[in-house]
Image (cartoon, rainbow, N blue to C red):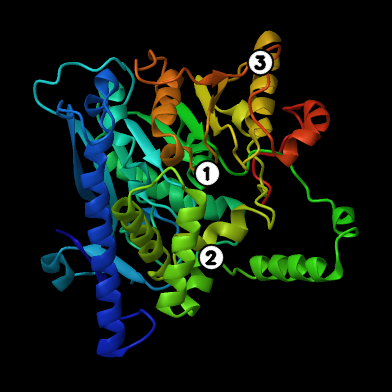
Amino acid sequence: MPLLKKSSSSTGSGSSSSSSSSRRIDDMRSAEASLVEYADRFATGATQGGKTPGTGSTLPSARLEVFDTEIPRSAVPIKGAKKCVFECKSREEAKNDDGDRLFVHGVKAIPEDGAGPTPYEGAPLVLLHGYGNGALYFYRNLLGLSDFYGTVYALDMLGWGLSSRPPFKTPEDTIEAAESFFVESLEEWRKANNLEKITLGGHSMGGYVSVAYCERYPERVDRLILLSPAGVPDFKPDPEMRKGLPLRMRLMIGMASSLFERGTTPGSVLRTLPESRGRAMVRRYVEGRLPAISSPDEQLALMEYFYTNFVLPGSGEKCLNRILGPMAQGRSPTVFRIPKLDVEEVAFIYGQLDWMDPMGGIDVKLACDKLRKDGKKAPRVEVYGVGNAGHLLMLENWRGFNAALIAAGGGAIPVDSTTPFQFREDGPEFFQPLQWQQEEEKSKKFEFNPDEADPIKS
């Protein structure tokens, strides 16, 4: 199995540092393997006839396979030393490393022989994770989605998970250069895997990257599915909102914003903490954000996966303040960019209790509907909602998430799933009850002007 090898250009020295890094890599691999095992419990075949996960007698109709794809380093816009902070390669390859190769790690669900044709007639589904996550955040979904989509890929984007972690040093300090780090590595991965086209699905930050990829390579995308995507609304924080807050709160917000703009990331903070304290923070996060995961062993595997992903040396995480602002607003909002995409089908999927603003997706739909009504070219857009779920909807309500993703691909809803909400202008309200709802009237005033929208605000 490929390994992550610490390079000579990494910070730190001595056997203690090397041993600690090797242990964390092994820990992440072990956590990944555990989540792969758990995936079988959430296969569609194991839930037919009302059976609960882990009790079904029907075997999954697909299998999971972890794999690595080599891509040329020269294709990714990185300046400076060739060596990565961490490099993914086999022991034999490490002996003759010239620094010209990177690896993208991933997992794929492959239909078993004899499983029969799958309903989806489009290109294979490729899933990109959100900020600080990895490919195995989709462990509850991959096998079930494979029943409809056929082969399904989930990737560790470059600089995250068990993919190579090159220094995040782009030729220019611009939004476009930061996007290119991920876009070009994804394109090289597609070419290396001989995929003529892909159905692209991205969660949170992965959704933002997916939009940027579609702008550059629209001919390679069959359909775009945005899963609670980051950076959609044109949101500008109002400084007046702080004036009514207590002094201590204003100071805390000011300090946090300052650290954010200077490039401080959640991972950089976690690495400064003693391991016991860092793990305790991650445990509280998982237990608080994901009560739907009640199995202690499953919780432990997810905690380990999350923790080790963040404490390995930082790379892709450093895009954060280049792409988003301190309030998670897009510096180049995709609400202006998606209507210009040369992709026929676009779908948004949000959790009912999502903290990511669903009005961003709704604004895009309304703008594209208007453009199409006026005889102009624009994607056909739909917005879906998953009940009893927030931002991590793929974990919080895996059945509902799968159903929505299948609906977004034009498929029939599985018999054991609830039909996902689908937005209509004259339909009922669904997303609730978060603060952004109070801005509904303001949001309705959004108007897309293709002559004024700036696709990249560098």
Q: Mark 3 points at which residue?
A: 369
> Are the residues tagged 1 and 2 within 8 Å (C-beta)?
no
Location of residue 139 in the rendering, given as x and y in whole percent from the top left corner: 31, 42
Q: Residues within 10 Å of mark 2 (few under 14, many from 20)?
A: some
Is tag 2's residue or tag 3's residue first in the polypeptide sequence? 2
Location of residue 107 in the rendering, given as x and y in whole percent from the top left corner: 26, 44
Residue name at image x 74 percent, y 41 percent: 435
Picture layout, residue 347 above or below residue 318: above
Disc 2 from disc 3: Cα separation: 38 Å
Q: Which amino acid does label 3 sit on?
A: Asp
Q: How crowded is mark 1: few (under 14 residues within 10 Å), some or many (20 or more)?
A: many
Picture layout, residue 399 above or below residue 257: above
Residue 266's disc is 2
Left or right: 188 in relation to 405: left
Q: Which amino acid does label 1 sit on?
A: Ser
Location of residue 355 in the rendering, given as x and y in whole percent from the top left corner: 62, 43
Residue 204's disc is 1
Q: In which quarter of the image is residue 395?
A: top left
Left or right: 207 in relation to 53: right
Can residue 119 be seen in this snapshot? Answer: yes
Residue name at image x 84 percent, y 51 percent: 238
Can residue 193 be seen in this snapshot? Answer: no
Q: Quadrant of residue 151?
A: top left
Q: Give SS at disc 3.
A: helix
Task: Give the label, 3 or 1, closer to the camera.
Answer: 1
Picture layout, residue 99 above or below residue 340: below
